Amino acid sequence: MIKKLYFLIIINILLFNFFVHAQHQDFIVKEGDILFQDLDCGEFCDAVEKVTTAYKGAKFSHLGLVAKNEKGEMVIIEAVSKGVIMTPLQHFLAKSHDKNNNPKVVVGRLKPQYRHLIPAALKAAIKLLGSPYDEVFCMNNNSYYCSELIYEIFKTANAGKPLFQLSPMTFKDPDTKQTFPLWVKYYKDLNKAIPEGDAGINPGSISTSDKLDIIYAYGLPGGWETNKVEQKKK
């Protein structure tokens, strides 16, 4: 019985990967693309999404950079709880999916006048592989959360000038004007002060940057303002 169940789980995973590939085989990501994700991670993702504004109202709580590994395979360089890692593209896409079983992922591509920064940004990202995750969400501490990683590598590529803009962070519920209880506990456990108002960056703000275009949607992120998913190529 256990072997049969295990076999069915493997088959479902393979079928999902095949379905994703078949549905989106006409679209090919490029190195330097930024993938924005509506990641279903519970209260933390919900809190991030509630206080940020993203493209078309999408609820983005994560993002990563498209790169190639040594074998020439498409991967995503991302900052997660384990630190800065390289994740196979299909594994990244399989993290969350909408009611139609499509990945809740949207693709951003730098506008032509900024694409010359991509090679240097990729080199900077690779150098940061293995860096620790920034659990306190503080800039300039040699650790990185997902959008901080993107901010820093493009800043490095742009000769130290930020490509994406920082803004004051908030950990307060916009409905109650009070700090989310989960953040109170989170920072208490870290024995750190909540960095309310400190400069930071998030996936939503990067998705609305005038430095890039949103060119493709694999699926329907939460909060998306239209019922029809855009799927166009550039």
Image (cartoon, rainbow, N blue to C red):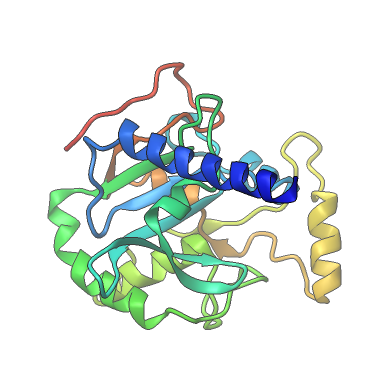
Is residue 86 or residue 140 the one in the foreground? 86
Q: Kindly identify the residue that appears in the image at 40 percent across and 17 percent down.
A: 228
Q: Kindly identify the residue that appears in the image at 85 percent across and 71 percent down.
A: 189
Q: Kindly identify the residue that appears in the image at 74 percent across and 49 percent down.
A: 2
Instruction: Please identify the quadrant where the C terminus is shown.
Output: top left
Instruction: Please identify the quadrant where the N terminus is shown.
Output: top right
Question: Which image quarter: residue 76?
Answer: bottom left
The answer to whether residue 12 is left or right of residue 63 is: right
Is residue 128 or residue 29 the one in the foreground? 29
Is residue 211 or residue 190 the one in the foreground? 190
Q: Is 29 located above or below residue 189 in the figure?
A: above
Q: Is 209 located above or below residue 122 in the figure?
A: above
Residue 5: percent from left, percent from top: 68, 44
Question: Which image quarter: residue 32?
Answer: bottom left
Q: Kindly identify the residue that appears in the image at 46 percent across and 53 percent down.
A: 92
Residue 41: percent from left, percent from top: 67, 49
- Residue 178 in view: yes
Is residue 175 or residue 234 the one in the foreground? 234
Residue 22: percent from left, percent from top: 32, 34
- Residue 205 in view: no
Residue 187: percent from left, percent from top: 80, 67
The answer to whether residue 231 is left or right of residue 149 is: left
The answer to whether residue 106 is left or right of residue 94 is: left
Count of all numbered marks drawn on residues in the image? 0
